[in-house]
Amino acid sequence: MTHASKRQLFAALALGVLALCGLPAHAQDFPTKPVRILTPFPVGSGPEGLLRLVADKLSRTWGKPVVVENKPGGNGFIAIDTFKRGATDGHDLIQLDGVHLSAYPYLFKKLPYDAKTDFEPLLPLFKTYFFIAVATDSPYKTVADLVADAKANPGKLNYGSWSVGNPVHLGSALFESVTGTDMQHVIYKETSMLYTGVANGELSFALGTNATAGAMHRAGKLRYLAVAAPKRVSAFPNVPTIGESGGPVGFEVSGWTTIAAPKGLPKALTDKIQRDIEKALAEPDVREKFATFAYEPFILNRQQFNAYIQAESTRFGAIIKKAQVSLD
C-alpha cells in the first residue's frame, strides 16, 4: 500500500470514528481560525469583564485567539448587526443581554433581528439580582417605609434608569404595579449619573446590581434597602429580600447574559462550544470574578435554558403590556 493510500485510509477511518461518535469532523476541528465574540456592553462593565476572562480561557482551550469586540450603544443593535453580517460558521459569537431575547420583542414593533431565528443561545453566563438602592441618609429604613410614603404621596416619589425598557425601568414599573403605587420615572444619560442622582437625593430610589451600583455603595454613598431575589444573596447576607423588608413577598428582578451562536449550526458544534464555555465558567478565578459583582452561577442545560427564556418572555410581555411601554 502506498503512503498516499495509507493517508486516505487513515482519514476515512478517522471520519468513520467521528461519525460513530455523532461528532462531525468540522466540529472536532473547531476553531480553525480566531474566534470573535461581539458584546453590546462597554469596556469595564461587569458583563464585559467576565466575558473577557471567559474568552481568555477559551483561547487556551482552543489554541486560537478569542477576541472580544465591544460594540456598545443603540440598544445593542450595533453589536447584533455586526454579528448578523459576520461569520456564520461559529467563528463569530455574541454576548446578549437577557432583554434582547425576552423583552425587546414586546417593546419594539420592528426589530433589526428575530430573537427566535437569528440566535442559538448556548447557556447563561450568570444571574444577578437587583437591589433597591437609596441614599445613605434616606429616611427609608425598610421597603415598607418606601411603599407607605409612595401611597401617601401619589406621583411625588421618583425612581430612575438609563433608558426606557431596560431591566431597571421594567423592574421598577413592575414594583409600582405590584405595590399599587404611582411614581415618576426619570431617565439619566449614563449609569454613573443615575446612581449619583440617588446618592444626592434627586431620586427616591433606583434598582441596581452590585456591578452597576456597587462603586457608590462601597464609597458609602448608597445603601441597599433590600434585594429583589427569592432569598438573600451570599455576597450581602445582611441585606433582606424585598419580602423580608415589608414589600411584596417573592418579588424578583434579575438580569442575565448569554453567549449565542448563529442559528442553524450543527448540534455537535454548538454542544462543543457550550461545553468549553461551561469549563471556563467553572475555573476558580472566574468564580472570584462572580463574587466581585455579586453574580451567581446560573447552570441550565439547553432545554432548560430555552424554557427559561420563554418564561421570561411571557413575564416581560405582561409587564410591558400593563405599563403600556413602547419604544417605537
Image: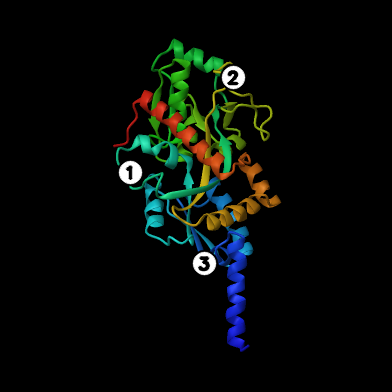
In which quadrant of the rendered view does residue 21 lie? bottom right
Say whether disc 2 or disc 1 marks the residue closer to the N-terminus.
1
Whether label 2 touches label 1, CB < 8 Å: no
Q: Nearer the viewer, residue 16 or 223?
A: 16
Which of the two marks, 2 or 1, is nearer to us in this view?
A: 1
Report how far apart the C-alphas of labels 2 and 3 lie in the structure: 48 Å
Which of the two marks, 2 or 3, is nearer to us in this view?
A: 3
Considering every residue shown, the one lying at the far top of the view is: 152
Which numbered marker is on residue 34? 3
Q: Is residue 137 above or below residue 74?
A: above
Residue depicted at x 39% and y 34%: 165
The x, y position of residue 24, in whole percent, is 55, 63
In the image: residue 277, left or right of residue 180: right
Say whether disc 2 or disc 3 marks the residue closer to the N-terminus.
3
The x, y position of residue 99, in whole percent, is 44, 39
In the image: residue 89, left or right of residue 52: left
Q: Which residue is mark 1?
A: 111
How many labels sit on residues? Answer: 3
The x, y position of residue 306, in whole percent, is 51, 41
Whether label 2 touches label 3, CB < 8 Å: no
Give the structural element (helix, strand or loop) at label 1: loop
Give the structural element (helix, strand or loop) at label 3: loop
Q: Is residue 269 above or below residue 178?
A: below
Which numbered marker is on residue 311? none
Q: Which residue is mark 2?
A: 243
In which quadrant of the rendered view does residue 221 lie? top right
Give the structural element (helix, strand or loop) at label 2: loop
Mark 3 residue type: Pro
In the image: residue 116, left or right of residue 227: left
